[in-house]
Image (spheres, rainbow, N blue to C red):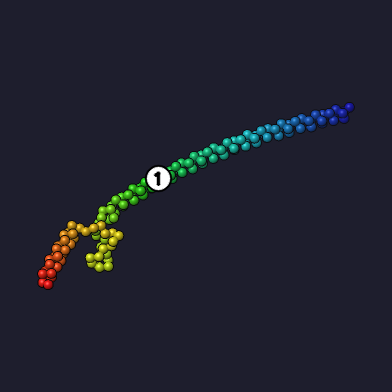
Amino acid sequence: MREKRRAEEERRRAEEEYQKAMVARDQRCAELDRLERECRARLDAADKEFNRAMAGQIKARRKTEQLQDMEDTQAHLFNVMTSDMLTENNECSVSSLGPGRVLPTMFRGMTEEQKAQYRRDQLQQAEEKKVRRSLR
């Protein structure tokens, strides 16, 4: 009977130990699950913060690029408007090949003084031609 009681007591103690181990295991699983959820929540928060920061950087970079493009466009328009081509600067058409020669791609016409001189030369040549004809 003692043996039976001792065996029963041993079985009951083993059952209690088993129950305690199962409870401890369940608590540990619940704790690990809670920790995993907390970790996942922190990772999600970190991802959101990183994405917000990246979006801010992209927005700032795009704004900087737009400002740079606008400045480049304005500089280009200024250069076009003040270039020798549009202002018809006759000094740019002077050729380095010799005096009196011009670059055809840059020539924008004669100045009023050049036109007057050209007309005087024409009149002088006409007079010379008349004199030559009258001498014949």
Q: Quadrant of residue 47?
A: top right
Percent x, y of residue 4: 87, 28
Q: Mark yes or no: residue 128 visible.
A: no
Q: Secondary structure at mark 1?
A: helix
Percent x, y of residue 133: 13, 69
Q: Quadrant of residue 26?
A: top right
Q: Mark yes or no: residue 126 visible.
A: yes
In the foreground, 31 or 40: 40
Report the residue at 30% width, 60% height from top. 105
**Count of all numbered marks drawn on residues in the image:** 1
Percent x, y of residue 25: 71, 34
Which quarter of the image is occupied by the C terminus? bottom left
In the foreground, 10 or 19: 19
In the orientation shown, which residue stands out farthest toward the right? 1
- Per the image, the residue denoted by label 1 is 66
Query: Which amino acid is tagged 1?
Result: Gln
Which quarter of the image is occupied by the N terminus? top right
Q: In the displayed structure, does residue 1 sit left or right of residue 45?
A: right
